Image (cartoon, rainbow, N blue to C red):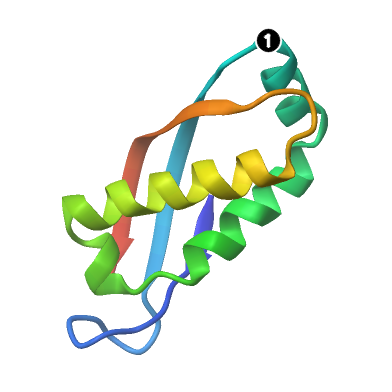
Amino acid sequence: MIVNIRPSAGSGPNPMAAMEFFLEGMSPEAIVEVKDRESEIRDLFQRTMEEMTFDELAIAEGKQLLTERLRQALNANLTKGKVRRVFIKEAVIKP
């Protein structure tokens, strides 16, 4: 997933983030729902990532905050279960 993120003091005018995620569901139904609604979930993740600044995502605490925000947003939209954790498999942040 490639997203433009908010500029900050440590970035240029158009910072970007490229990330790959894994999800851990509390039930198989939750993961099936995520797969069935993949385009909607992808959009939800992109909108959540766009709200963060380069400086936030450049540090480990910011990435942890992002995964927590993604988990909360995802659980607020799922109807057949919950996601226990969101993991970042790969992250590339461009200033």
Q: Would residue 11 appear left or right of 67 to someone viewing this image?
A: left
The answer to whether any part of residue 47 appears in the image is yes
**Helix, strand or loop under label 1:** helix
**In the depicted structure, whether residue 49 falls above or below residue 64:** below
Q: Nearer the viewer, residue 32 or 81?
A: 81
Is 1 in front, or is 73?
73
* Quarter the C terminus occupies: bottom left
Where residue 85 appears, as percent x and y from the top left, is: 44, 29
User: Residue type at mark 1?
Assistant: Pro
User: Looking at the rendering, which quadrant does residue 55 occupy?
Assistant: bottom left
Q: Is 68 on the left or on the right of 62, as rendered? A: right
Where's residue 53, x and y in %? 34, 74
Callout 1 crowding tier (Cα within 10 Å): few <14, some 14–19, many ≥20: few
Give the x, y percent position of residue 65.
33, 53
Q: Residue at x 40, y 82 (%)?
A: 14
Residue drawn where x is 60% and y is 64% of the image: 47
Q: Is residue 95 visible?
A: no
| Residue drawn at (56%, 28%) of the image | 83
Total number of numbered discs in the rendering: 1
Residue 54 occupies quadrant: bottom left
**Residue located beneath label 1 in the image:** 28
In this picture, residue 57 sits left or right of residue 36? left
Measured as percent of width and height from the top left, residue 66 is found at 39, 53
